[in-house]
Amino acid sequence: MMKTLSKVLSALLSAVMLISLSGCWNYSEIDDMNIVAGVAIDKNKKENNLQLTVEMVDTQEGMQQSQASFKMISLSGNTIFDIARNMISLTGKKLLWSHAKVIILSEEVAREGLIKVIDWYSRDTETRADVFLFVSSEKNAHEVLNLNSETKTIISYELAQMMNDETFTSTAPVVQIWDFIDKLESSGDNAIAPLIYMYEKNGQKNEHVNGTAVFVRDRMVGKLNGDETKYALFAKNKIKGGVLEVENAKGTPTYSLEILSSRTKVKPKWVDGRLEMQIHTVTHTGLDEAMSAEGFAGEETIQAIAERAGESLQQNILSVIRKMQREYHADIFGFGEIVHEEMPRTWRKLKDKWPEEFTGLDVKVRSEIIIQSTAKSSRTIKLGD
């Protein structure tokens, strides 16, 4: 991670120098700027307004050290644009937003509605649309950025790297602000965002991204844990990696299947006068763990394991869809958009009442697991006499 952050800092400094040489800015102008790495947005209860915390790259200090340095500032105000401009009075320098990587929102802000806090960020010409979005499960979002005082690293860039690697676990969605806003503007696809926590290990606090914040319109209405998120991603055709745990014939968790590739097809159909969503998943896996000394004997064949894995996946996907229908009434799977694309006439009739239609929608799931690899060995470890 330290090597990654050093590369990031070098890239930033190189970009600054290149811009200077190109004639857009001169050196004195660059020296008058602070590079924003990420921001956290909280509710300031005392003044009943918003608090913006900014993590900045300290380029002056960083050039004298082997690792990137950081600076933090916080300010409150009624609008994000007003706060961002007023921060100049605290730093004495203009903030450069084009290198920002993350926006962390407190759960309180998320539940009150996000349009008021992300509209400026999506509209301003100095910001970028590929910034990663998070909802903090901590009391305040700025607590996550404050971890840099313990880790001595730029937390925003660590989080961005985590999201680049998230496909290996598939326990949190990868959401950039352009995608989030696109979902807000859709009438057939509800928005989601990854959840971020703090945990302590060996006396040091660290960040952990796991689970999903669920939105109806621009307000957060609930959460999914990491496992539920994985099955939701299957339904959304967003699985690129991760692990599936499989029980043996006696119902004991025994096998681990590494997801090599997966494809989900969703087809809307009229069945007996009712709209039905038919979901078919095909997942190629490798058997990476077998916690058994019995080997593949009797029913414990590769095919038997694959069939149980398929049945379990099918049930879990259906379970998370039912949760969205019954508890949150949130179509995070984009079923409405699929109906819009494949049944435009039907969508015109259902569009205005889609939340109600989604809640009562019939859903059928069929999952196939293909175990195409057993890693370096096709047998389990045998115990000696």
Image (tube, rainbow, N blue to C red):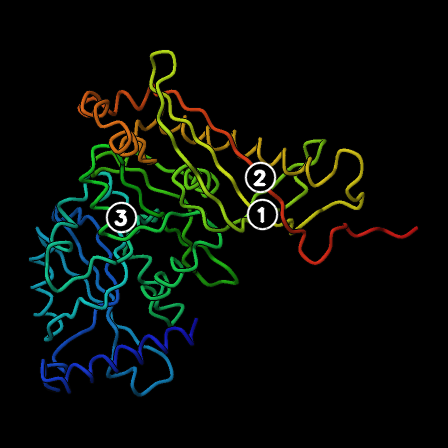
Depth check, front residue: 19 or 323: 19
Q: Nearer the viewer, mark 1 or mark 3?
A: 1
Image mark for residue 285: 1
Residue at 74% x, 51% y is 378
Mark 3 = which residue? 106
Marks 2/1: CA distance?
Answer: 7 Å
How far across and how far down the image is residue 345, in percent?
Answer: 21, 24
Regarding mark 1 in the picture, which secondary structure is present there? strand
Quadrant in the picture for residue 33: bottom left
Regarding mark 2 in the picture, which secondary structure is present there? strand
Residue at 62% x, 39% y is 246
Q: Is residue 15 left or right of residue 268?
A: left
Quadrant in the picture for residue 32: bottom left
User: Marks 2 and 1: CB-CB under 8 Å?
Assistant: yes
How far across and how far down the image is residue 358, in percent?
Answer: 30, 24
Count of marks overlaid on the render: 3
Marks 1/3: CA distance?
Answer: 37 Å
Looking at numbered disc 2 in the image, what kind of residue is underneath it? Ile
Looking at numbered disc 3 in the image, what kind of residue is underneath it? Ser
Mark 2 = which residue? 369
User: Marks 3 and 2: CB-CB under 8 Å?
Assistant: no
Marks 3/2: CA distance?
Answer: 38 Å
In the picture as drawn, the residue positioned furthest to the top comes out as 272
Which of pointers 1 and 3 lies earlier in the amino acid sequence? 3
- How packed mark 1 is, by other alpha carbons closer than 10 Å (few <14, some 14-19, many 20 or more), is many
- How packed mark 3 is, by other alpha carbons closer than 10 Å (few <14, some 14-19, many 20 or more), is many
